[in-house]
Image: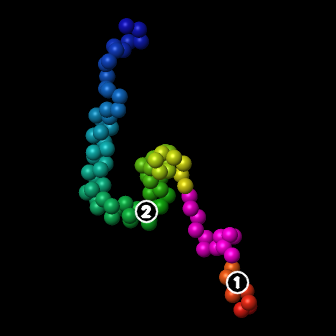
């Protein structure tokens, strides 16, 4: 037995540490006690930097588009496409 650890000992992969699970449960309970969503909404207004730090901790580190593909971003500017030809009658009215 090299390294001092028996094969198969310890927690299974993906099983949370009991202490971490207990702390998360306490945090969620405390949040519920002070108003939950309403409390967080107030903190977003009065301490936005702290709130956004929290948001950054709970968002996924990577995002992907539909079906796991690349993210598609559509920008709507209100400016017509170059391919849109002006109506011929409008040119004569000017």
Q: Residue 39: within the magenta?
A: no
The N terminus appears in which quarter of the rendering? Answer: top left
User: Could you say whether the residue bearing mark 2 is in a helix, strand or loop?
Assistant: helix
For the point 45% across and 61% down, which residue is it?
A: 47
Label 1 packing within 10 angstroms: few (<14), some (14-19), many (20+): few
Q: Is residue 85 at all visible to an observer of this figure?
A: yes
Label 2 packing within 10 angstroms: few (<14), some (14-19), many (20+): some
For the point 31% across and 48% down, which residue is it?
A: 27
Instruction: Please tell me the numbered disc located at residue 46.
Output: none
Q: Is residue 5 above or below residue 48?
A: above
Expressed as whole percent of the image width and height from the top left, the position of residue 83 reads 68, 69
The C terminus appears in which quarter of the rendering? Answer: bottom right
Q: Magenta region: which residues? A: 73-85
User: Could you say whether the residue bearing mark 1 is in a helix, strand or loop?
Assistant: helix
- Frontmost of labels 1 and 2 is 1
Snapshot quadrant of residue 34: bottom left
Instruction: Please tell me the numbered disc located at residue 44.
Output: 2
Magenta span: chief secondary structure: loop
Expressed as whole percent of the image width and height from the top left, the position of residue 22 reads 27, 40
Q: Residue furthest bottom?
A: 93
Foreground of the two, 65 or 33: 65
Where is mark 1, residue-wise?
Answer: 88
Expressed as whole percent of the image width and height from the top left, the position of residue 87 reads 67, 82
Q: Is residue 12 above or below residue 89?
A: above
């Amino acid at each position: 037995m090299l390294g001092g650890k028996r094969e198969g000992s310890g927690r299974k992969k993906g099983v949370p540490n009991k202490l971490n699970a207990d702390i998360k449960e306490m945090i969620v309970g405390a949040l519920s006690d002070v108003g939950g969503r309403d409390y967080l909404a107030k903190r977003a207004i009065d301490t936005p930097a702290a709130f956004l730090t929290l948001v950054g901790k709970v968002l996924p580190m990577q995002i992907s588009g539909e079906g796991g593909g690349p993210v598609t971003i559509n920008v709507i500017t209100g400016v017509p496409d170059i391919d849109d030809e002006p109506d011929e009658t409008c040119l004569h009215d000017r």
